[in-house]
Image (cartoon, grey):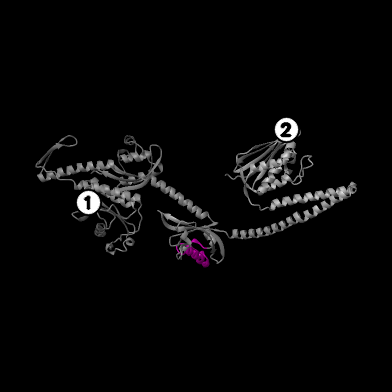
C-alpha cells in the first residue's frame, strides 16, 4: 500500500468522525469472512475487538446505511444485540464497503457514547466517503501479480539514465507487482479525483492550485485554467483567511495530520459560497511538502436554510417575548407544557420555570367547564373523551377550535379568555399543540354594559314610540278638531273673521296642524323598522312622474331619464318613493322663469354605491351662504309660498336610515344637482 493510500485512509476516517461530531470511527476489511481493522480514529485498543464484532453483527452487505441514533433505546426489544463495550455505544452509523461486482470488502463505521441525530446531508457525505474507501480497497484487491521469468530488468530512470536491476525471479516479480500496483493506484486515484462527487484539489505550498476536478470548478465558478492563475488566498473571504493559514502552518509543522474548517469563498461572479474544507498534506522522504490535498463540500444551500431558520426562530422568540398581552403556551402531544411566554406569566401569575415540563394546561381550567366540554364532544362524536384530548381534539382533526373558557390564576382568581388551540406538525405528523389566549374579561364587562345600555335604549325607544303615537293620534285629533271648528265658525259667522285677532287665531290653528304633521313624519322616519325590499328605481321614478303629470305639464318642465333596463336598490319602498317625489317636486317648485326648464335623472356606480342624480337648471342655491343649513328643518331659501323647509330634512333622514347619503352641487341662476347614494345590490 502506498503512502498516499495510508494518508487518505487516515484522513477519511477522521473526516467521517468530524462530519457526525463523533468521538470514534473505524474502517475494517473482510477477508474470507474474517474482519480486521485497516485504521481507526481515537478507539481505545482494548475496545477494538468488541467494536469489530459489533459492526459485523449490525451491518449486512445488503444495507445502504445503518443508523442507531440512540442504540439502547432502539434495541430494547432485542437484548441479543446488546454488547458490553467500554466505551458503551449509543450512537452508531455503519456503511458496508461493496466492490463493483458485489463483493463485501468491509465496513465504514462511526461511534459515540452519547445519542445524536443525523440529517440527510450527513448521510450523503458518509456514503460518499464510504464509496471512496471502497474504491481504494478495490484497487488493492484487484491488483494481480505479474508473471515473468526475467532475472534482469533493463530500463531508464526519470533522468533517462540507463538502469539495470539484478535479482532473483521472486524479487523481480515483487518489484514489477509493486510497479503495476502503483500505476493502477495512480490511474484509479486520477479517475476518482476527476469524477468525485465533492470538490477535490491539489495545491502547492504557496497556495497555488496545481490540479482541480470539475466539482471545484462548479462550486467556485471558474474554469480550470482560470484557477491555475490564482491562489486560494485570492478567492478566500478575508475574515476566514487567517484561520485557514494558521491551520496550514500547523499542518506543515506536523502539529496536526489534517484540518477541517467551515469557510467562505468568492465565486467568479462575486457571490459568496459556503464550504466545508478538509486539507491533508503529502511530503517526500526528506519531509518537504510536495502538495496539499483539499476536499471542498458546498454547503451554501444548507447555510441559507440555516440562516432562514435562525431568523424564523429569532422572530418567533421575539414574538413570544414581546407578546405581554397574549398568553402563548405550547405543549407536547401528551399535554406537558414546553413553552410559556411572558404574556402567559403576566396573565396567569405563574413563572415558566414553575410549569414547563411539569404540568398541562388543565391546571388553569375550571373542572366543571372541562366536564361540560367533554359532554359536548361525546354528544357530537358519539364516543368518550377524557384528559388533555378534551382541549385538543378539534385541533387534532383540523376543525376550528376557538372557544371561551374561564381561566384560573395562581392566586385562585378567575377571568374569561378566548382560547385558540392549533396542532403543530412536523413532516405531516403532530408534534405538539399551541394555545393562544386573550383576556376578554374587560370585553365581557363592556359587553354587559352595552347590553344594559341597549336595554335602556330600547325602553326609551318604546316610550318615544308611545309619544309618537300620542302626537300622531291625540294631538292631531285635537288640532284637526280645533281647525274644523274654526272653519265652521268662519262659514257660519264670516263677519267675525274680519277681526284681526280672529284671523291670527285661524292662522295659528293651521300652523299648529302643519307643525304636528311635520314632527310626526320626522319621528316616524327615525323610529321606523320597515322591511327592506329590492326596488326598481326606474319604475318608481316613472310612477311619480305619472302622478305629477298635471304639475309637470303646467310648469313646462322637460324630464329626461337615463337609467339601465333594471336598476335595483335594497331599501324601504315608502322612503324611496318619498325621496323621489320630493326631489322631483323641488325641481318643479324652484324652476327658472327665464329659460326652458329641464330635469335630468340618471344613475352611475361609485365605490360600491348606487348613485341616483337629479340635475335641473332651476334657480339654484347659494351654498356659500346656505350650504350648512340646506338640510335643516324649516329652512327655506327662496320666496316660494309653498316652501316649508321639511322635505329635504326628511329625505336626508330617510336616506341615512337606509345606509346612504345625499350630496348637493348648486349655483344661483345655473341650477342644482342632488346625488343620492344608496347601497348597491347587483342582480
Horizontal and vertical percent position of residue 414: 56, 64
Q: Measure the C-alpha gap from mark 2 to mark 1.
A: 111 Å
Q: Residues within 10 Å of mark 1 (few under 14, many from 20)?
A: many
Q: Position of residue 57 (x, y in %)?
A: 25, 58
Q: Dot 2: within a 10 Å radius of its alpha carbon, few (fewer than 14), some, or many (20 or more) residues?
A: few
Residue 322 shown left or right of residue 282 in the figure? right
The magenta segment is 350-379
Q: Nearer the viewer, residue 541 or 494?
A: 494
Q: Earlier in the sequence, mark 2 or mark 1?
A: 1
Q: Position of residue 274 (x, y in %)?
A: 38, 44
Question: The C terminus is located in which quarter?
Answer: top right
In depth, the one of 492 and 195 nearer the eye is 492
At horizontal 19% and vertical 48% (from top left) the residue drawn is 141
Which numbered disc covers residue 503?
none
Looking at the image, is 523 positioned above or below residue 559? below
Q: Are marks 2 and 1 in contact (CB under 8 Å)?
A: no
Q: Position of residue 297 (x, y in %)?
A: 34, 45
Mark 2, secondary structure of its residue: loop
Q: Which residue is mark 1?
A: 105
Instruction: Tell me which secondary structure the magenta stretch mostly adopts.
Output: helix
**Label 2 belongs to which residue?**
596
* Position of 362 relative to 104 (above/below): below
Kindly tell me whether residue 396 is visible in this rendering: yes
Amino acid at each position: 500500500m502506498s503512502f498516499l493510500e495510508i494518508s487518505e485512509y487516515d484522513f477519511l476516517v477522521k473526516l467521517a468522525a468530524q462530519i457526525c461530531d463523533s468521538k470514534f470511527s473505524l474502517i475494517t476489511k473482510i477477508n474470507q469472512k474474517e474482519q480486521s481493522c485497516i485504521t481507526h480514529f481515537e478507539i481505545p485498543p482494548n475496545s477494538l475487538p468488541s467494536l469489530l464484532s459489533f459492526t459485523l453483527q449490525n451491518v449486512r452487505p445488503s444495507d445502504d446505511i445503518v443508523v442507531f441514533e440512540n442504540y439502547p433505546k432502539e434495541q430494547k426489544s432485542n437484548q441479543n444485540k446488546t454488547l458490553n463495550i467500554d466505551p458503551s455505544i449509543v450512537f452508531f452509523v455503519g456503511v458496508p464497503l461493496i466492490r463493483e461486482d458485489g463483493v463485501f470488502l468491509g465496513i465504514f463505521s462511526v461511534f459515540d457514547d452519547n445519542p445524536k441525530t443525523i440529517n440527510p446531508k450527513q448521510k450523503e457525505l458518509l456514503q460518499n466517503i464510504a464509496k471512496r474507501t471502497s474504491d481504494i480497497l478495490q484497487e488493492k484487491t484487484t491488483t494481480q501479480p505479474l508473471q515473468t521469468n526475467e532475472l534482469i530488468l533493463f530500463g531508464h530512470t526519470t533522468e533517462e539514465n540507463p538502469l539495470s536491476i539484478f535479482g532473483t525471479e521472486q524479487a523481480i516479480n515483487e518489484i514489477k507487482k509493486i510497479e503495476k500496483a502503483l500505476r493502477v493506484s495512480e490511474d484509479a486515484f486520477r479517475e476518482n479525483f476527476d469524477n468525485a462527487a465533492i470538490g477535490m484539489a491539489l495545491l502547492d505550498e504557496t497556495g497555488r492550485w496545481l490540479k482541480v476536478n470539475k466539482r471545484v470548478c462548479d462550486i467556485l465558478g471558474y474554469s480550470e485554467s482560470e484557477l491555475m492563475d490564482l491562489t486560494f488566498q485570492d478567492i478566500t473571504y478575508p475574515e476566514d483567511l487567517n484561520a485557514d493559514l494558521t491551520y496550514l502552518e500547523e499542518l506543515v509543522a506536523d502539529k496536526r495530520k489534517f484540518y477541517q474548517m467551515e469557510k467562505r469563498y468568492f465565486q467568479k461572479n462575486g457571490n459568496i459560497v459556503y464550504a466545508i474544507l478538509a486539507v491533508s498534506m503529502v511530503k517526500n522522504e526528506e519531509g518537504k511538502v510536495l502538495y496539499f490535498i483539499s476536499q471542498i463540500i458546498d454547503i451554501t444551500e444548507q447555510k441559507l436554510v440555516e440562516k432562514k431558520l435562525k431568523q424564523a426562530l429569532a422572530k418567533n422568540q421575539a414574538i413570544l417575548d414581546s407578546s405581554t398581552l397574549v398568553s402563548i403556551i405550547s405543549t407536547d402531544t401528551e399535554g406537558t407544557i414546553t413553552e410559556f411566554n411572558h404574556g402567559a406569566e403576566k396573565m396567569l401569575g405563574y413563572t415558566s420555570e414553575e410549569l414547563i415540563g411539569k404540568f398541562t394546561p388543565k391546571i388553569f381550567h375550571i373542572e366543571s367547564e372541562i366536564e361540560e366540554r367533554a359532554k359536548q364532544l361525546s354528544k357530537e362524536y358519539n364516543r368518550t373523551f377524557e384528559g388533555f384530548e378534551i382541549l385538543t381534539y378539534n385541533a387534532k382533526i383540523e376543525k376550528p377550535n376557538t372557544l371561551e373558557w374561564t381561566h384560573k390564576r395562581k392566586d385562585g382568581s378567575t377571568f374569561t379568555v378566548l382560547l385558540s388551540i392549533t396542532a403543530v406538525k412536523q413532516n405531516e405528523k403532530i408534534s405538539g399543540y399551541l394555545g393562544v389566549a386573550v383576556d376578554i374579561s374587560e370585553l365581557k364587562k363592556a359587553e354587559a354594559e352595552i347590553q344594559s345600555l341597549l336595554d335602556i335604549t330600547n325602553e326609551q325607544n318604546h316610550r318615544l314610540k308611545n309619544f309618537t303615537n300620542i302626537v300622531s293620534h291625540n294631538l292631531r285629533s285635537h288640532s284637526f278638531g280645533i281647525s274644523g271648528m274654526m272653519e265652521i265658525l268662519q262659514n257660519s259667522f264670516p263677519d267675525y273673521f274680519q277681526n284681526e285677532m280672529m284671523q291670527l287665531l285661524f292662522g295659528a290653528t293651521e300652523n299648529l296642524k302643519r307643525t304636528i304633521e311635520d314632527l310626526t313624519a320626522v319621528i316616524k322616519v327615525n323610529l321606523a323598522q320597515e322591511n327592506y325590499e329590492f326596488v326598481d328605481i326606474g319604475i318608481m321614478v316613472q310612477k311619480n312622474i305619472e302622478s305629477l303629470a298635471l304639475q309637470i305639464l303646467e310648469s313646462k318642465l322637460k324630464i329626461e331619464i337615463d337609467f339601465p333596463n333594471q336598476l335595483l336598490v335594497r331599501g324601504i319602498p315608502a322612503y324611496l318613493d318619498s325621496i323621489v317625489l320630493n326631489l322631483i317636486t323641488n325641481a318643479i317648485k324652484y324652476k327658472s322663469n327665464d329659460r326652458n326648464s329641464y330635469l335630468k335623472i340618471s344613475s352611475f356606480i361609485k365605490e360600491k354605491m348606487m348613485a341616483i342624480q337629479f340635475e335641473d337648471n332651476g334657480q339654484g342655491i347659494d351654498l356659500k351662504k346656505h350650504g350648512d343649513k340646506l338640510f335643516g328643518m324649516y329652512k327655506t331659501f327662496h320666496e316660494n309660498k309653498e316652501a316649508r323647509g321639511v322635505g329635504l330634512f326628511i329625505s336626508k333622514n330617510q336616506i341615512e336610515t337606509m345606509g346612504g347619503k345625499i350630496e348637493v352641487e348648486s349655483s344661483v341662476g345655473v341650477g342644482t344637482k342632488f346625488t343620492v347614494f344608496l347601497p348597491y345590490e347587483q342582480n
